[in-house]
Amino acid sequence: MSVAIPPKGQGPLAKREARLAWSLLLPTITIVSLVVILPLLSIFWISFKPIGLADLRPPAPVLRESLRGSGDQMRIEYRLRNSSQDVEITDVTIRDAWPEGLIVTGDLPAGCVLDGREFTCDLGTLEPGYNERLSVPVMLADGVDQDAAEDAAEGTEPEVRGEADSILTNSEFTLDNFARVFDGDEFWTVMWVTLFYTVVGTIGALLFGLFAALLLNKSFRGQGILRGLYLFPYVAPVIAVAFTWVNLFDPFSGSANALLLQMGVTNEAINFFGQRPLALIMVTVFEIWRYFPLSFLFILARMQSIDTDMYEAADMDGASPFQKFWYLSLPMLLGILSVLFLLRFIWTFNKFDDIFLLTGGNAGTRTLTVNVYEQAFAISNIGAGAAVAVIIFGCLLAFSFFFFRFISREEGL
Amino acid sequence: MSFLRFGYVTGPIIGALWLFILATTVSITMSFATGDPFRPALIVSLILGAVSGLLAALEQEKRIKIAIIAVLVFALTLVGFGPIVMESNSVSEGVAAVGLALVMGWSMNAIMNEVPLGPLTRHEMEEAWIRFLTGFGYIFFTAIVLIPFYVMVMTSLKSQSALLQNPLDFSLEIDKGWALFRSYHELFRDFNFGTYMWTSFYVSVLTVFITLAFSIPGAYAVARLRFRGQKAFSRSILLIYMVPMIVLALPIYIAFSVTGLRNTVIGIILIYPVTTIPVALYMLQGYFRGLPAEVEEAGLMDGLNRLQVIWKITLPLALPALASVSLYVFMIAWNEFLLAFMLLDDPSKFTLTRGVAMLNSSEIPREHLMAGAVIATVPVMVLFLGLEKFMTKGLTAGSVKG
């Protein structure tokens, strides 16, 4: 008699389940790695490359064909140019089909062969900035109309090929990008702005959200309407609300300034988004305004799930409203508050569009994310932009380390 | 804070602050409504408010107290020594004075409800302060949310020159009739906004479908099936969710430039779902976890295979979650700006947000920009308000993305 022992390892059912799980996940994994992991890797690659916006188009030979002159002086002319001023192109070949009725009267340019109507050239290497004409003297055969021949010659596109070293794929590396990014006071200014924006924006949004949740954590008529209303800033497209704010706080035609002037708070118009410290404070206020609804929603949901028995017991013991808030509600909310803090911290840190639309990163509001755009597109230095992106990613990894240490406890993820 | 525990201390302090808040609120409201100068008078507000607070703490019939405070505020305002200083026509001045007086009389008594003049218990004092803070909170949040949207809508209906003359005058010239909507008309006629709206709409809808197609199986696998790496997987969903868009936008821009996908709607449709799939995965897996596994096991016992279980049991049960995820994804896609801004240059292919960004130039009048903002906002607002319950549930179910 054999003794029944529990099976060890994975049984066939478990294996089948795991296989199904992977096959269900496969499409997602593929697409996410294609669009998230791959770009992340390429960001690292690019950050070590001396590459500008103009280098995105690899250097290529550019060719234009035309039939010029008339009568005996006719010639087919090819204008050939190297699109890059500092990279050479090798193995350049031209291939073109000539129209019928053209007779070559002179010498072909060096390296070119005419076989029937097939015209081919092998030109070897083009120097950087190469720009020359190749011309073939020709005449028309009898009975061929010149206009028709011109149309035919210029109608067929000549084919040109060449190989060039693209900066994206060659093995040239540099640390210049990082040196440039870390260079000088600018980097520390950017870091300080980012830190201020993130910390104040996150805490502000949490506090306002908590306040709003306390207001709506009771049932009365119109509660639903108010809740919907308070979510407006979060739901509306960022572009609409950002431009509205710019409009509202415009120094010349903004209503906010008019109101402040009229109430005698200030004597002259304030340029809210245009002067240092104020611009940074304003973008932070905008961030708080736009995202307090989110914290409000989460805190309210948590509040409504707190057991009311606890409050009844506290009432019996004679606890005052503030005591109930401080000793009962707040400890119960601490979990969701810390999760919200960490998540909002990371997402505020990552925020780009808001500041970009409000100030464009001017007047001392350039955060790290705006700096990526500035470096890559405004200064046209893609490499430096990528270097900033790598720094952001590094910070992010550090944050998510903290995040998972806390979140694992709070949410059981 | 023990000195606060007397009705004759707490009452006047709350009253002074409250009247100043109300005076400011009424001034701002009336300024925005009429364009004429209305201004809260700080000193008068504080003194008169303190007096009202004291009156409200008296032991008297409630209606009498309301009447006394209201008459006091109203009379002083009309004489010109009231909490609001104003220069306007008599109608709006009257409205402001009556409104302020009635609201003050009523709310002051509500705040000081059953608060005696003498010593207070801790409960009485705290409750008075909480009622004061609650009132302030409602006014404050409603104001900060409504004012920008009010300005947005009203600016779109006025001409820029009129607003330059008096930036506060949002009064509409009703007699202009349909001409009020001139900037909307021009946006649709000259700036192709009809096309942009359609592009935004179908891009968003396609994004929703593609996102669901990818995230439903993925979320189900992570939530239900046991396999090695499941835990690491549900963490990495969150991690991916945290990668900033601008970091990805740069290589995507390069890749799209090289492959010729830049400046095409196809490229946008390819890239939007990827930004929303992690969100949808995160929300859906949370919901799937909450569904009872027994129902599915019963299905398995009855001879369905896993895919049939998902199709016939899980999905019908998860319909509310699917609805809220779809809504949320639609909202993200509709509001998306960064990628559209970087990847689209050709005005014939713009999405709505990209089209609005195009209006932000000094040559195009402000009212067009604001009209564009309204056009972009209204559909998503309508959708949201109509389905608000789904939305709030779905948001709190898992996602916190901003």
Image (spheres, coloured by chain):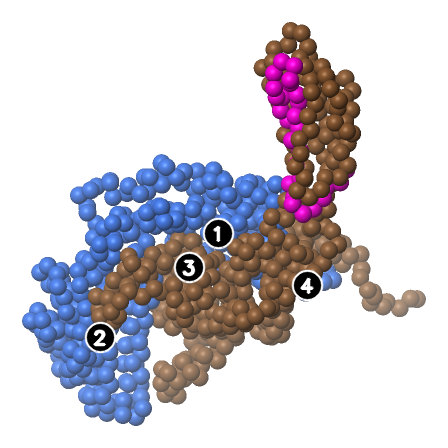
Chain colours: A brown, B blue
Mark 1: give few (<14), some (14-19) or many (20+) Cα within 10 Å. Answer: many
Q: Which residue is mark 3?
A: A358
User: Would residue A277 appear left or right of A382 to someone viewing this image?
Assistant: left
**Chain letter of disc 4 in the image:** A
Quadrant in the picture for residue A277: bottom left
The reply to whether residue B312 is in sight is no
Q: Residue, x 55% and y 40% (percent of image)?
A: B264
Viewer-side label of 4, 3:
4
Give the label on residue B337, or none. Answer: 1
**Chain letter of disc 1 in the image:** B
Viewer-side label of 2, 1:
1
Measured along the vertical axis of the image, is residue B100 above or below residue B357? below
The tag earlier along the polypeptide, 4 or 3, is 4
Query: Which amino acid type is marked by label 4?
Result: Leu
Mark 4: give few (<14), some (14-19) or many (20+) Cα within 10 Å. Answer: some
**Residue A82 on the magenta span:** yes
Separation of residues labelled 4 and 3 (CA atoms)? 33 Å
Query: Which amino acid type is marked by label 1?
Result: Phe
Query: Which amino acid type is marked by label 3?
Result: Leu
Mark 2: give few (<14), some (14-19) or many (20+) Cα within 10 Å. Answer: many
User: Would residue B370 appear left or right of A333 to someone viewing this image?
Assistant: left
Give the label on residue B20, or none. Answer: 2
